[in-house]
Amino acid sequence: ERRKMQERGPVYLEAVVQDVVGFMEPVLHEKQVTVHCELEKVPVWGEAGRLKEVVMNLIDNAVKYNRPGGHVYVTVRSEEHRVLLIVRDTGIGIPEDKQKRVFERFYRVDKSHSKEVGGTGLGLSIVRHAAQYHGARLELKSQPGKGTTITVTIYLKLQESEKEQEKELLDLPVLVVDDDKTCCESTVATLKD
């Protein structure tokens, strides 16, 4: 099914993080993992649903690949013209030779634990695509046995220009031309959404 795009607007990542952590409370208790949050209230311009997917997948992985008694540290802070979302865990870590592939669809670092851990191998791929959609940069640092840190950097200047471009584009007329009437009607319907 085609995903309907939500409107972009101001999104407070600290509220998104709080919602996700609250939602995951039963899993945190079951896995015996503690989440620590250091959250600055700063808005980013984006699609709330996609940003929630980013936060949910990053925290879910940090919990899923952690140890009983482990910790997850979530930080949202602004630096100059950007907002950083940092998720760091004390989990099992990712071997260096596997780190470049973790953002690929269906990729699993350790296939032997797939049934035990669950999931589809899509989480970090979703994170990558949502980050790209928002013009954000992803950075992964990991050491086996010590944990993983993933940083999402959202550039505010880029977002300001995107807001202006979106406003300008909303008023432009669009001409749809296709020799297939059904295709033409489908394209018009999609553009109206």
Image: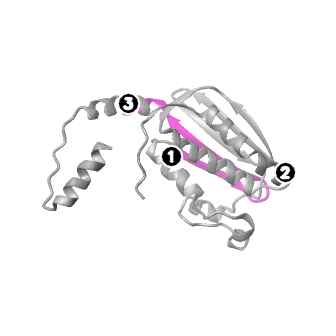
* Secondary structure state at the residue bearing disc 2: loop
| Identity, as a three-letter code, of the amino acid under mark 3 | Lys
**Are dots 2 and 3 in contact, CB under 8 Å?**
no
The majority secondary structure of the magenta stretch comes to strand
* Secondary structure state at the residue bearing disc 1: helix
* Secondary structure state at the residue bearing disc 3: helix
- The residue tagged 2 is 32
Q: Is residue 38 left or right of residue 131?
A: right
Q: CA distance from mark 2 to mark 3?
A: 42 Å
Of marks 1 and 3, which one's residue comes earlier in the chain? 1
- Residue 123 colored in magenta in the image: no
Q: How is the image coloured?
A: one colour
Name which quarter of the figure residue 118 lies in: bottom right
Q: Residue at x 43, y 33 (%)?
A: 159
Name which quarter of the figure residue 101 lies in: bottom right
Q: Residue at x 62, y 51 (%)?
A: 57
Q: CA distance from mark 1 to mark 2?
A: 29 Å
Q: Give the vertical position of 16 relative to 188 (above or below).
A: above
Q: Is residue 87 left or right of residue 186?
A: right
The crowd level at tag 3 (other Cα within 10 Å; few <14, some 14-19, many 20+) is: some
Q: Is residue 35 left or right of residue 185?
A: right
- The residue tagged 1 is 131
Q: Residue 143's x, y, as percent? A: 73, 56
| Identity, as a three-letter code, of the amino acid under mark 2 | Gln
Numbered circle sitting on residue 163: 3
| Identity, as a three-letter code, of the amino acid under mark 1 | Ala
Judged by depth in the image, the label closer to the viewer, 2 or 3, is: 2
Judged by depth in the image, the label closer to the viewer, 1 or 2, is: 2
Q: Nearer the viewer, residue 91 or 140?
A: 91
Marker count (numbered): 3
